[in-house]
């Protein structure tokens, strides 16, 4: 199985990491993109290590970038997106397992963050983990929720989730985050949902501030 790797930023405190923030980039990008979020969050998580792995495959549309799964542009986009997420999930699950075993950081001290395709991966995998591996939280920027098998059952984790989406996004329909908000709430997940007015496919200052406040409110053991 492919081993993920990418840029990393050590804790601002200078000590051993007590938390981990895993940042999952969007389609055609790489870890250098989302590692840029780390400086915005080091004040609220000074003891966290930030890791932004590259996706497992070279992107078919953008030669210099990576993808978590191939993108379909035909009529079966949703079905193929679901299959793509399911196919890529084991690689991310293995990455998280390696991270926890190598650092001693617990799932409960791990924040999973994704943008666009990376948000789809973060939401799917983070809510597919068993209850004993519940994450500190999940943040999905401009993404969609592809429910894992068994979603809503007591055996699976229900970490708090933050959803942020621009209402002018022409790449990933903002309705996907609204649908995710409804589905997660119905399953008893603590959801924090923010719509950035006039924002396209990106992370605006108001959305970043909302996510930062979400992180600041999470319990840190």
Image (spheres, grey):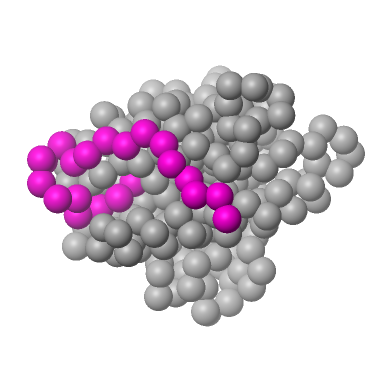
**Which residue is nearer to you in this view: 176 or 48?**
48
| Residue at 66 percent of width and 22 percent of height | 62
What is the quadrant of residue 147 in the picture?
bottom right
Q: How many marks?
A: 0
Q: Is residue 148 magenta?
A: no
Q: Position of residue 50 (x, y in %)?
A: 31, 41
**Rendered view: 59 above or below 68:** above
Q: Position of residue 38 (x, y in %)?
A: 30, 33
**Which residue is nearer to you in this view: 142 or 17?**
17
The answer, for residue 218, to whether it is visible in the render is yes
**Which residue is nearer to you in this view: 202 or 101?**
101
The span picked out in magenta is: 1-21
Q: Is residue 4 magenta?
A: yes
| Residue at 17 percent of width and 46 percent of height | 47
Left or right: 208, with 155 as reference point: left
Residue lying furthest right: 75
Give the overall secondary structure of the magenta segment. loop
Residue lying furthest bottom: 154
**Rendered view: 98 above or below 216:** below
What is the quadrant of residue 34 in the picture?
top left
The answer, for residue 136, to whether it is visible in the render is no
| Residue at 36 percent of width and 27 percent of height | 36
Q: Where's the C terminus, which quadrant?
A: bottom left
Q: Where's the N terminus, which quadrant?
A: bottom right
| Residue at 58 percent of width and 21 percent of height | 64
Q: Position of residue 173 (x, y in %)?
A: 68, 34
Q: Position of residue 82 (x, y in %)?
A: 72, 52
């Amino acid at each position: 199985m492919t081993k993920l790797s990418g840029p990393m930023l050590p804790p601002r405190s200078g000590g051993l990491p007590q938390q981990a923030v895993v940042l999952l980039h969007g389609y055609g990008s790489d870890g250098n993109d989302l590692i840029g979020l780390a400086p915005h969050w080091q004040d609220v998580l000074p003891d966290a290590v930030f890791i932004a792995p590259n996706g497992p495959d070279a992107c078919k549309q953008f030669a210099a970038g990576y993808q978590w799964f191939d993108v379909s542009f035909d009529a079966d986009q949703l079905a193929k997106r679901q299959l793509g997420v399911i196919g890529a999930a084991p690689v991310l699950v293995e990455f998280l397992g390696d991270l926890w075993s190598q650092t001693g950081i617990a799932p409960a001290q791990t924040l999973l963050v994704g943008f666009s395709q990376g948000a789809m991966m973060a939401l799917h995998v983070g809510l597919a983990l068993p209850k004993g591996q519940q994450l500190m939280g999940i943040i999905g920027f401009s993404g969609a929720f592809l429910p894992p098998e068994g979603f809503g059952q007591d055996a699976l984790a229900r970490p708090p989730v933050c959803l942020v989406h621009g209402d002018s996004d022409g790449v990933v329909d903002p309705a996907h985050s609204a649908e995710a908000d409804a589905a997660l709430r119905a399953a008893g997940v603590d959801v924090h949902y923010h719509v950035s007015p006039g924002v396209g496919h990106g992370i605006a200052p108001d959305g970043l501030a909302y996510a930062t406040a979400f992180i600041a409110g999470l319990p840190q053991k």
